[in-house]
Amino acid sequence: TVGRRQSGRKKMTSPSPTHSDSSGSSKHDSNQDSWEIVEGLRGVPASMQEPDRQEGLLLKRRKWPMKGWHKRYFVLEKGILKYAKRGPDLKKGKLHGCIDVGLSVMSIKKKAMCIDLDTEDNIYHLKVKSPELFEEWVSKLRHHRVFRQNEIAMYPHERHLFHPHATSSPSLNDSLRKVRCSGRATLTKQASINQAKVSSWLHSSEDMDKCCKDLEECESYLLELNLLLKSMEVLHRTYSAPAISALQSPRLHASNPNLSTTETNTQEVCPESPDSPTDVSRLQEDFCRLANNSESNSTKTTSYAHQECPGGSHSLVHQASNESKASIPESISEFFDAQEYLLSSSSSENEVSDDDSYISDVSDSVSMDTYSNEGGSERHNSGTRYSSNVVTLARRRSALPAPSPTSSVSLWNILRNNIGKDLSKVAMPVQLNEPLNTLQRLCEELEYSELLDTANQTNDPYQRMVYVATFAITAYASTYHRAGSKPFNPVLGETYECDRSDKGYRFIAEQVSHHPPVSACHADSRNFSFWQDVRWKNKFWGKSMEIVPMGTTHVTLPAFGDHYEWNKVTSCIHNILSGQRWIEHYGEMSIKNINSNDCQCKITFVKAKSWSSTVNEIEGVVTDSKGKVVHSIFGKWHESVFQGDPPSATCIWRANPMPGDQEQYYGFTQFAVELNELDSTLRPLLPPTDTRFRPDQRLLEEGNTEGAEEQKQRIEQLQRERRKVLQDNSMTHQPRFFKKSNNDTWVSNNSYWEQRRDPGFTKMDFPVLW
């Protein structure tokens, strides 16, 4: 995060730049019950007077699991909003959090007296008790926000504050101390942590000194790049800023996955303000120069690493790469189609508290003991398929027909007027999609079904729970590499089957409801049954999107009569509008066997702290009926899960390796690549409602975005027409393969595979979906 200038600089009293007036905001409508996005700096940056300090008690929504509000003491000064439990705590430096208002998207809701600040890393929900105090805080926040944005825009080149070598100046040291809560301390601390770790790792290398020097230079470049990106983001968000399209650098991103790249879309320039900041071109040139320097140093450093660690130390290199993500986000994300999912107010903000307990970083060097795969099967590059009574061996595809196209869509233009609103009717262009849909994404949760096979052959109930819990965690593994795209929305009545006899299960899914959108699925195996119905509530906050899943996942193990059920956790996609999108999952997952009280399990998806290098961590315990811990597990949801305590922990699961060209193909795993495959032997066996026949999704897979967009609009129009026919005739849609259970959830009616066999779907009538 870009910090502010040295506090010793005098206040400037010359005229302020052009910006929205103190009451200006982008209103969705005149109703005070709707959200308004607060506009920021507009026009050319200029000197402006520092606004007055504001402080007092506000209500802040609690961190996950997002229940209730509590009082916190806030101080707003020079565009930085700090808070603690009490006022005296702030004076003692006992901060609970710190927000750069200038780099946040701010939205307000007058009737509820709510203020929301989306910082990308966290979403802060604030509430004021009286209308007068609400107006006072909103006014001050507006002025401080514009002041802070102007400050960043005017002084984007003060990067010496970041440079790890430039510490001889007393004023510089003083500045570094004073900005410890604004994000600079995070980056500087991260640099020193990573430098120490790498130096230790290379203790036996003859090239240690040279390698460390190159690493320091590379770290410095990355820190400066982060500063420039934040500066350009502020300029880019002003209405007068030109499009920042010159930053697209696929070559740099390919060699340095930690470098955040911008989309190639051209943001529209608001015609209201003809002025443009003069620093943008210079910032772009500096960014590209630093990126090239960083690439050069990164390449040299990587060569040293591999020279010293042939064969066995790749995991350490990978771990160091993951730990650097706190300063330059590496992971990327998916987000669900806003056209179909409802909104829900929720919080993802995470603060320091005395009861917080987070596990430390765990090295991949712990011993590995792979689990039994007796109930599993061969991997997915080949598989067995059944046609009538004839068994044939079929080879599955290893790549998509075409790489993902370059997107030219401006999400900001689509979403800026929909903060806090129901996004279910906002049209999303096909360029934002990946060539899979939500029904197929549900099937992806079975990629590591071997864990359930193993659980069904494990006599110890506590160890069975470990395998079931690990399976539940793996459902999130594929989200890590999803490069900013989202699945297609299934239309009402759409179906999907996946007959994986090589893995021992058969899966079906159907879109059973449109309003609200509900997807139901069921999978059967000789070792397990798996089913769920899923719906989502989401909220777009200006920079991030929170996704709160609704519904319960079920698994039964026939060998023991176990019936497990668990909830899903909250997901949040960061950097929705700029930079590189990444996803995190957080919250508590509770797993219980409803047919036995012998044991239960709680898994915590740890929310990343802005000052910590650890991300994507999970930790959990399996307890007996008295609450005593029997087993503990830990790891990262995108990499691996371990049982026990390091260094003697056992590896229960490790993610499959990604295809080498995954970045060019939507970040798909090999399993995902196979999901939409349609060959001549399978075609006559599927119902016409199967997702594989959907033309817009197929065209996108083949790289034809124009044709895909045209077909997508046609399919959506057909769905509207079918819905109107049902409404005009007072009829409701009846799902074909699922039914409502007694507890109002959707379960399989066990008819799909019977009808597939006899009489066969080609002899049955289906609605025309596309």
Image (tube, rainbow, N blue to C red):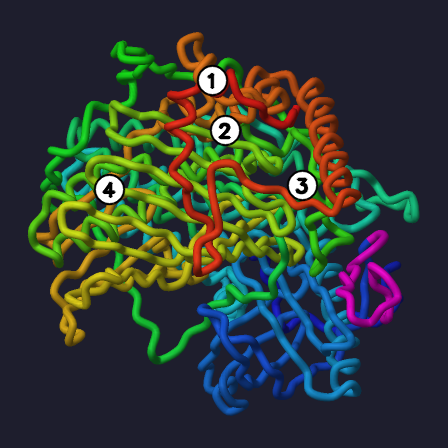
3 or 1: mark nearer the eye: 1
> The C terminus lies in which quarter of the figure?
top right
Say which mark, if any, is on residue 666.
Answer: 2
Q: Are marks 2 and 1 in contact (CB under 8 Å)?
A: yes
Distance from Cα at disc 3 to Cα at disc 2: 30 Å
Identify which amino acid the numbered label 3 is placed on.
Leu
Q: Residues within 10 Å of mark 3 (few under 14, many from 20)?
A: some
Image coords of residue 594 (percent x, y): 26, 62
Say which mark, if any, is on residue 230.
Answer: none
4 or 3: mark nearer the eye: 4
Is 288 situated above or below 76? above
Identify which amino acid the numbered label 4 is placed on.
Phe
Identify which amino acid the numbered label 2 is placed on.
Tyr
Distance from Cα at disc 4 to Cα at disc 1: 30 Å
Disc 3 designates what residue? 283
Q: Nearer the viewer, residue 67 or 158?
A: 67
Image coords of residue 395 (percent x, y): 31, 12
Residue 418 visible in the snapshot? yes
Distance from Cα at disc 4 to Cα at disc 2: 31 Å
Residue name at image x 41 percent, y 23 percent: 756
